[in-house]
Image (spheres, grey):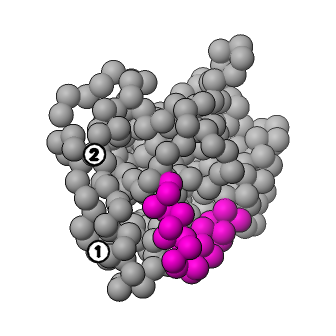
Amino acid sequence: MTRPHPGTALSAVEDPATPGCSPLRDCLHCSVRHLAVCSALAPEEVQALERVTVSLPLPLGATLARAGEPRQHVYTLTGGALRLVRTLSDGRRQISGFVLPGNYLGLTGSDHHRYDIEAIADSRVCRVALPQMKDLRARFPHLERKLLQRACQELDDAHDAALSLGRLQPAEKLADFLLRLAARQARLGENGLRVTLPMGRGDIADHLGLTMETVSRTFTKLRQQGLIALPHLNTVEILDEDGLRLLSADETY
């Protein structure tokens, strides 16, 4: 499949017959099922979900949805990483968050997308049309409860993000960001002390309200303090987890 230029919409998103798109056949063995909302479904109920789910590839740089477009589907990310982007009136870019495997896109009361949703790595999503998801929620109340639980978690995460953005020191913001990624990675069953960064320094800067230069200097500062190691540009080894927690001034991990 030819990769689109960054920011271009992916035709596969609109056409499930596009090569590379396929009905989902094996939800029970999905590697992120334990993190996804579909984990609420019993094995015998999963077939109902599989019948209405399409698995879509999203190459690096593809756009899943644009802000202002009508919402027609909900999505679960099963691989890769996405970013949620809003462009301010003065042209500045704000990244409200990153979507990682197991995350669900669709917990909103808006009829339109509020952000551009862009792939920052080769990714794959499971797509379900809104009417079909509504039907599943009505048939399986435990799925509805799982979605409510996820909505409450996203509200808590939004409050934590607001707290982080309100901090004055870049090191506090970056320490908090790394710890949250580490906790997420540990829930995936991976090494929580060796954090992979699918996003670049510029994306981190636009998420934390810093400049890219400040983010780079802060990474260097944390490394010099012995809190982290940087074996590769997109890999962070946490050497002193307690030190990072103390720096982030957050005891919720």
Residue assigned mark 2:
16
* First of labels 1, 2 by sequence position: 2
Quick one: 162 or 91, which is closer to the camera?
91
Q: Is residue 212 above or below residue 155?
A: above
The answer to whether residue 169 is visible is yes
* The residue stretch that appears in magenta: 130-152
Q: Give the prevailing secondary structure in the magenta stretch.
A: helix
* Residue 199 rendering spot, x and y as whole percentages: 47, 38
Residue assigned mark 1:
29
* Residue 92 rendering spot, x and y as whole percentages: 66, 19
Instruction: Report the Cα–Cα distance between label 1 and label 2.
Output: 22 Å
Quarter of the figure with the C terminus: bottom right
**144 inside magenta stretch:** yes
* Residue 183 rendering spot, x and y as whole percentages: 56, 64
Position of 144 with respect to 169 (left or right) is left
Please name the residue shown 46% across and 42% down the image. Answer: 82
Q: Is residue 8 above or below residue 174?
A: above
Position of 139 with respect to 68 (left or right) is left
User: Which element carries disc 2, helix, strand or loop?
Assistant: loop
